[in-house]
Structure formats: C-alpha cells, structure tokens
C-alpha cells in the first residue's frame, strides 16, 4: 500500500467516525458521553490524511527541483567538488591501473588468480542483470511501498460502512450472567402511577431493598426480550460502563399476563407490579427478581439501546 492509499483510507475512516458521531450510530459502540471524543478522533484522522498528502506533494516537488538542478559530478551543497582521480587531502594520488605499494598491478577487467573475468555490468552466475537505476524485482521505481500491514486499516472502515452491527441483544444476554450489583442507595420515588423505572432500578430495589419502595405501585418498564433454555422470558437491558465491549445484562423474569408468543430481541413496554418471587441466573447464579405483568405492548428500539445508569 502506498502513501496515497493510506491517506485515502485514513480520510474514509475519519469521515465514517464523524458520520457515526453526528447520528445515533455511535451509540451502538460507546456511551453517549464519549461523543466529543469520537468527533475529535474523526477530525484528527482527516487532518492526518490531509497532512500526509500535503507532505508527499511537497517532497515530490522538492525532489523534482533537486534532480533538475544537480548535473552529473556536480557536488551537493556543503560538499567539496572532487574531480575524477583527484586525491583527497592527505591521500596519495593513485593513477588508474597503478598498483599500491606491495600490491600487484591489476589491469582493468583482468581477473584475479582463480577468478573468472567479469566484464562491467555483466551479471554473475545466478544473478539477473541490473541496469543503473533499474528497480529490483517487486520494487517500484522511485516509489517505495509501505508495509502490507497497512491494509489492516480497511477493516474498521468496512466494518463501519458495510456491516454496522446492531447493539448487543438477546444472544449476549442469554450467554452472560446478570450483572446486578447493590446500589449505593435508594432515592425516594416520585408520586403518581404508573411509575416509569429502568430495568436495573427495579431489579436493585426488588433484590437489595426487598421491594419496600415498590409495593402497591403500578410500574412501567422497557427492555428487550430474551429466553433461557427452559423458555423462561426475561426483560433485559444491557448496562454500559464505557463501550459495547464491557456491556453486561441486567434481567427481570416475567410472570403473570405474559404474551403467549415472545420473540427474542423484541422491545416491550411492560406494565406490572412488584412480586417478592426471585430466581437465579442459570449462567452465573446471580439474583433475578420477578415482575408480575399486567399488560405489555411492543415498542420501537430506543435511540440509545444501552442503560448507562445501571451502576451509578
């Protein structure tokens, strides 16, 4: 991959990051608070691509001017002119074909003892003839190539442009144990029913506060559906610390007026009441509270599918 291709890929990757950060696409990968960093990363990549092209353009123009200005045998700036066969300071003049002291005279093209005569520019046995300034095999003339590992830059570009995987869903939740942890405290809940709660908020109050603040309240909770191996339905929300790589599920088991047919990854808005019934996660044996469902309806996937408040 040459520098031009690298610059093009850097530009595409930067533009893709800017597109993701200016839409909801970035929320599939990182939490909303990291949006400024995604924008900054995209801008830096585009600036790097532009700087690389500008630098290569200047270097090419400088090389063209330098080749035109330097004639054969003309000394470079800061270098003394050396004429052919002229001795340097402190070095005795050696005429062509004149042997040094103690050395036998060797005529031009005369082979040494036991050595075959080699004419100028004649290739040795097993070696291809290489003319002056001719590029070697696999090397482009006057255009050095960068390492092939540079092609790995295409992977994130293709992943973001062509694939754009969805947010983590039922498969990840079914194969990962609940990440429910004890909250630092339980703030007072607002008055009025139905009370809208997050999955993690309900689960934390139901397990670690024994549902004291939930009793007698009509609750409304939104999440996506996942099923375990026995067919038990769960309402799940993936909690996020930083990015999708550290996402973990928090689960609520559903009982009561549950729809007879539930498809995994379907987002539901569930209305129900607290019940002291609990179960254990079959993956990590973590606690999972139940919710007694009184009604439900499918809803669209929220613009931010992750719960960023579950561990606060």
Image (cartoon, rainbow, N blue to C red):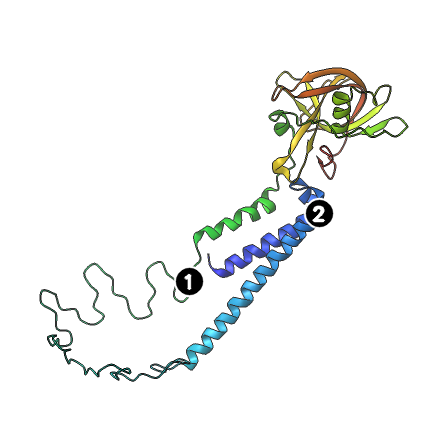
Q: Secondary structure at mark 1?
A: loop
Q: In the figure, residue 130 lies in which quadrant? A: bottom left
Q: Secondary structure at mark 2?
A: loop
Q: Circle 2: is it few (<14), some (14-19), or many (20+) Cα within 10 Å?
A: few
Horizontally, is 36 left or right of 109 in the view? right
Real-space Cα distance between discs 1 and 2? 39 Å
Residue 78, percent from left and from top: 41, 81
- Quarter holding the C terminus is top right
Q: Circle 1: is it few (<14), some (14-19), or many (20+) Cα within 10 Å?
A: few
- Above or below 302: residue 218: above
* Residue at screen point 21% across, 72% down: 120
As drawn, the residue found furthest toward the front would be 90
> Between residues 30 and 21, which one lies in front from this camera angle?
30
| Disc 2: which residue | 23
* Residue at screen point 68% across, 49% down: 21
Nearest to N terminus: mark 1 or mark 2: 2
- Above or below 312: residue 121: below
* Residue at screen point 59% across, 52% down: 13
* Residue at screen point 20% across, 82% down: 94
Picture disc at residue 144: 1
As drawn, the residue found furthest toward the left would be 113
């Amino acid at each position: 991959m040459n520098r031009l291709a690298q610059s093009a890929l850097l530009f595409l990757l930067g533009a893709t990051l800017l597109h993701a950060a200016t839409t909801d696409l970035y929320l599939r990968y990182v939490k909303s608070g990291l949006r400024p960093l995604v924008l900054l990363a995209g801008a830096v990549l585009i600036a790097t691509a532009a700087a690389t092209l500008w630098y290569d353009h200047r270097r090419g123009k400088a090389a063209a001017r330098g080749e035109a200005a330097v004639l054969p045998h003309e000394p470079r700036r800061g270098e003394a002119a050396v004429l052919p066969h002229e001795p340097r300071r402190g070095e005795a003049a050696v005429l062509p074909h004149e042997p040094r002291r103690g050395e036998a005279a060797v005529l031009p093209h005369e082979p040494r003892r036991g050595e075959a005569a080699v004419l100028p520019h004649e290739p040795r046995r097993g070696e291809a003839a290489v003319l002056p300034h001719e590029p070697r095999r696999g090397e482009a003339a006057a255009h050095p190539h960068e390492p092939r590992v540079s092609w790995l830059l295409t992977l994130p570009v293709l992943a973001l442009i062509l694939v754009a995987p969805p947010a983590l869903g039922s498969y990840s939740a079914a194969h990962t144990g609940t990440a429910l942890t004890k909250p630092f405290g339980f703030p007072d809940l607002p008055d009025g029913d139905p009370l809208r709660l997050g999955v993690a908020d309900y689960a934390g109050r139901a397990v670690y506060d024994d549902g004291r603040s939930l009793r007698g309240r009509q609750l409304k909770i939104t999440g996506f559906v996942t099923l375990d191996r026995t067919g038990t339905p769960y309402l799940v929300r993936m909690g996020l610390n930083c990015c999708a790589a550290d996402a973990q599920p928090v689960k609520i088991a559903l009982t009561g007026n549950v729809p007879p047919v539930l498809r995994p990854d379907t987002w539901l808005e569930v209305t129900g009441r607290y019940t002291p019934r609990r179960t254990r996660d079959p993956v990590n044996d973590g606690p999972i509270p139940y919710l007694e469902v009184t009604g439900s309806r499918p809803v669209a996937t929220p613009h931010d599918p992750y719960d960023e408040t579950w561990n606060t």
